[in-house]
Amino acid sequence: MESTPSRGGLNRVHLQCRNLQEFLGGLSPVVLDRLYGHPATCLAVFRELPSLAKNWVMRMLFLEQPLPQAAVALWVKKEFSKAQEESTGLLSGLRIWHTQLLPGGLQGLILNPIFRQNLRIALLGGGKAWSDDTSQLGPDKHARDVPSLDKYAEERWEVVLHFMVGSPSAAVSQDLAQLLSQAGLMKSAEPGEPPCITSAGFQFLLLDTPAQLWYFMLQYLQTAQSRGMDLVEILSFLFQLSFSTLGKDYSVEGMSDSLLNFLQHLRELGLVFQRKRKSRRYYPTRLAINLSSGVSGAGGTVHQPGFIVVETNYRLYAYTESELQIALIALFSEMLYRFPNMVVAQVTRESVQQAIASGITAQQIIHFLRTRAHPVMLKQTPVLPPTITDQIRLWELERDRLRFTEGECLLVVDSRSLAGGRTIQS
């Protein structure tokens, strides 16, 4: 996340989600080399490389000796020099290859031996199994099929989103609530008060599910070491999950206590299904297997049919049964009526300013209404009535018209100094 000053001088937070390459590039060389000790990690990193970088890695994968830099440069035509420069910097930043001095003083390039060895294992097979076999546990009497896993994952993740918008029926663990606050997605106005959604949290809800999960997992990983967890262990396990088979069960045998605790957090997020906390097997869900789609596509907004109609009298009609969407609308409007498949709300000065006080910006409210506009609204230009958009911005400016600066308070003043040395008598 980054903060930029608004027109009125208050800071507005803009949500920024790093991709896998940016995240790994910020890790220390020691941590990276430990990560590359796992074939699943090497395969996941290789999968996210640009096509040119993949080509170079595959051409050098079975070479034990360094290649001259000049020879590698000849593999790319001059018109693709920009892509060559980007791929070269990326492979160096991720420690996938490094320079080595050749006989005669020439500079050569060679793949990281740890990365090379484990990528070979991932592509060709061999090495240790990524997870323990569940055949010794026997058939699962409570086996889950794919549709039930999809439903479970959707329900668990929606509980987290409902908690963020303040739904009274949604509850999460203390660890998860603390992580939401540390990530800047929620905050408490006063100590002891329940947390409420922030500007960054509202932007977070506008992302699609894979991007939401990837952003959330990034925040989890950044605070993992402060909670006494092994970053390499949990990150490798995440990549291992992304190569799992949907509908297949996996054993928890051999997992460390830290990894078992991490598994419970994934269970709460809907990334894995485990019938009971002490169950000896778990099922990865589609959210875990498709987590990598959030790596390359993080930052995308929700793509779904529009359902909101906004009138010039500030009435808002939402044709939806989704509790989450209704809760989002209630963040910046007053609910008037609710029907089985529709709600009616009123956008008011008080409701908008209350949302702005929580950190939600006028532009975010307008963007929310525009991206969820009913097909009938999409036929007109502009999509939203200018009266509504202008008034929402004006309500925001009412709060931002003051600029706060630091000052000094003089508590004791000598009256003689103010009178030029003369004594002032009252």
Image (cartoon, grey):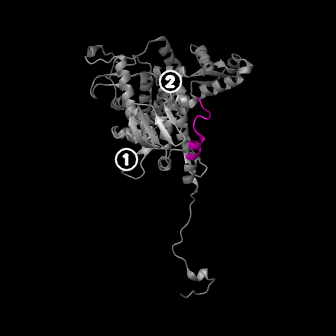
**Does residue 133 belong to the magenta stretch?**
no
Left or right relative to 30: residue 241? left
Task: Kindly identify the amino acid type of the residue bearing the numbered disc 2.
Answer: Ser
In the image, is residue 12 above or below residue 106?
below
Between 278 and 10, the one nearer to me in the picture: 10
Q: Give the mark nearest the N terminus, 2 or 1.
A: 1
Between 143 and 237, the one nearer to me in the picture: 143
User: Residue 194 bears which disc, if any?
Assistant: 1
Residue 176 position in % (x across, y down): 38, 38
User: Where are the magenta residues, as a range?
Assistant: 379-391
Task: Kindly identify the amino acid type of the residue bearing the numbered disc 1.
Answer: Pro
Between 332 and 37, the one nearer to me in the picture: 332
Residue wearing tag 2: 293
Residue 96 position in % (x across, y down): 57, 24
Picture quadrant of residue 53: top right
Q: Residues within 10 Å of mark 2 (few under 14, many from 20)?
A: some
